[in-house]
Image (cartoon, helix red, strand yellow):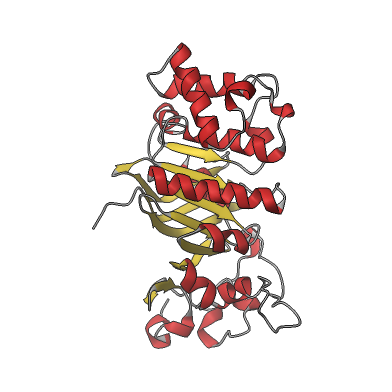
Amino acid sequence: MTQPVLSVRQLRVEFSLRRGALVAVNGVSFEIARGEVLGLVGESGAGKSLTASAIIGLLEPPGRIAGGEIWLNGQRIDRLAPEAMRAIRGKRIGMIFQDPLTSLNPLYPVGRQLVETIETHTHLRGADARRRAIALLAETGLPAAQERIDHYPHQFSGGMRQRVVVALALAADPDVIIADEPTTALDVSVQAQIIALLKRLCRDRGTAIMLITHDMGVIAEAADRVAVMYAGRVVEIGGVRDVIKQPLHPYSAGLMGSIPTLDSDLERLVQISGSMPRLTSIPSGCPFHPRCPRAFEPCSSARPQLARRDQSLVACWLYEDVSAGAAR
């Protein structure tokens, strides 16, 4: 079996406060293969962006990795010194964030920013680095890349700025790209272009992509597999078609039911009652049970574990032996 490019195993992220530790990410595990797009989906507060921050070593104090392991192409990276992690970030792990303006310095032309990144993480210098920058901008679909390389970020539209950010993420030909809500600030037509661009890069370069979003339409269009997160835990992982067409976890079913379709006879979309719990008040047992329409006896007292069901993994008592978990 081919070694995954990125492997996250039982990741636990805590925030140390005076009154104790708050667990924000609890036992998250997943893998991403070469040339695969894994969608990480869930409501705001599910722990998606914190998981990404832990992977790239950018957790802000008092946040910290309290347990688990993160492996990049067979190398464990969660215990690396800050200097060693900086060498990996940007070179082996590229990043695309929601707002391109936070990734681009408004005081410098985009070409200068690209060239600096290329010179930092590769052996290219001077004119060679500039040619590489122009080629990257052209690859990401920026019109007239050679003429526009010396323009400033404010001279580009939102979609064009996001293409520049994608070029920055690709500058060192990374093993993995983490895209955190890369289309949220864009209109629908530009969203489709950015999604198509990410899929093409994944196919042509073999890059592994971790796509974080709360938009199930983006997941349906871009991802190969989906990991559904709720209250800091992964509740279901499976192929995108399986999770969208036949979701197993009631929370996944609620998310999928919120997607409007042209061929549906439903007069109203599915609504999940309640809201994501705060870190200070995550329920015992399955954290989704207060909102779950199918909750029964063990859900409030025992936590279900991810287990194989058909082609997916799901953490739900509906698919587990209730008696086996009574002692949990």
Residue at the (48%, 37%) spot, across then down: 94
Residue 144, given in percent of the width and then of the height, sits at 61, 28
Looking at the image, is 129 positioned above or below residue 243? above
Residue at the (67%, 22%) spot, across then down: 151
Q: Is residue 182 left or right of residue 56?
A: right
Residue 164 visible somewhere in the drawing: yes
Residue 112, given in percent of the width and then of the height, sits at 58, 18
Looking at the image, is 151 positioned above or below residue 309? above
Residue at the (53%, 57%) spot, across then down: 222
Residue 16, given in percent of the width and then of the height, sits at 56, 47
**Residue extending furthest left?**
1
Q: Which quarter of the figure is the N terminus placed in?
A: bottom left
Q: Of residues 48 and 172, which is closer to you in this image?
A: 172
Residue 14 visible somewhere in the drawing: no
Give the total number of marks visible in the rendering: 0
Looking at the image, is 202 positioned above or below residue 41? above
Q: Quadrant of residue 80?
A: top left
Residue 295, given in percent of the width and then of the height, sits at 58, 84
Looking at the image, is 268 positioned above or below residue 279? below
Q: Quadrant of residue 251?
A: bottom right
